[in-house]
Amino acid sequence: MYSTTLCFLVKEQEILLGMKKTGFGQGKYNGFGGKIKTNETVLEGAVRELEEESGVQVEKEQLEDVGFIDFIFPANPELRHDVHIFLAHTWQGQPVETEEMKPQWFSISEIPYHKMWQDDIHWLPKVLAGNKINGKVVFADNNEDVLTVEII
C-alpha cells in the first residue's frame, strides 16, 4: 500500500479538474495529485504534485485538509492506496496543460461525474459542501467498477 494526495482548486462556484492523459486513470477527470515520496510530508507531496500536474503553485497553509479515503483493489492488491484530499481556494499562477493532465474549469453544478472514477459522486459533493470525510472504497476485479463505498 502507498499514500497519495488529491487536490481540487475551487473558485466561487467552479472547480478545476484535469483530464488524465497517461497512466493510472487515463481518460478520466480528476483532481491533481499523486504518490507521496518517502522524504516528504503529505502536505509537501500535495504541493509538489499540484505544481507538476497543473503548473499552479500553492503554499502548504493554503491547503484545506478535507478527507481521507482507503482505495482497495482486491484483484490487484498492489494498487491499494490511501488518498489525502485537499481543497485550495487561493493559489499562484494559472493552470496549464502538462504531460500528465489537461486542466478544465467546471461549474460545481455540472461536474462531469460520468467521466470520473465511479466513487467520486459519493464523496466529492460532500467535500464541496464543506464536510470532512473519511472513507473506504472497494473496487471490482476490473479495477474500474465500485463494489462498495463507505463514507463518513
Image (tube, grey):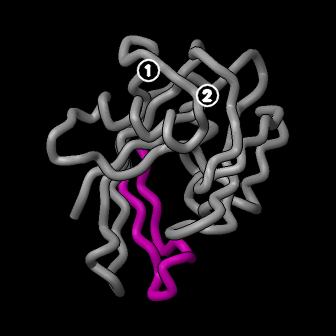
Q: Residue 150 colored magenta? A: yes
Q: Residue at x 27, y 35 (%)?
A: 42
Q: Residue at x 70, y 37 (%)?
A: 96
**Amino acid tagged 2:** Leu
Residue indicated by mark 2: 9
Quarter holding residue 28: bottom right
Q: In which quadrant is the N terminus drawn?
A: bottom left
**Within 10 Å of the Cα at label 2, are there few (<14), some (14-19), or many (20+) other Cα atoms?**
many
Residue 118 visible? The answer is yes
Q: Residue at x 63, y 48 (%)?
A: 98
Residue indicated by mark 1: 64
Left or right position of 100 against 97? left
- Asked if marks 2 and 1 touch (Cβ < 8 Å), the reply is no
On residue 50, the disc is: none
Q: Residue 70 colored magenta? A: no
Left or right position of 64 against 54? left
The kind of secondary structure element at disc 2 is strand
**Amino acid tagged 1:** Glu
- Report the magenta residues as a range: 136-152
Count of numbered labels shown in the rendering: 2
Q: Residue at x 65, y 63 (%)?
A: 21
How far across and how far down the image is residue 15, in percent? 71, 32
142 vs 121, nearest the viewer: 142
**Within 10 Å of the Cα at label 1, are there few (<14), some (14-19), or many (20+) other Cα atoms?**
some
Quarter holding residue 107: top right
Q: In which quadrant is the C terminus drawn?
A: top left
Which tag is nearer the camera, tag 2 or tag 1?
A: 2
How far across and how far down the image is residue 68, in percent? 35, 42
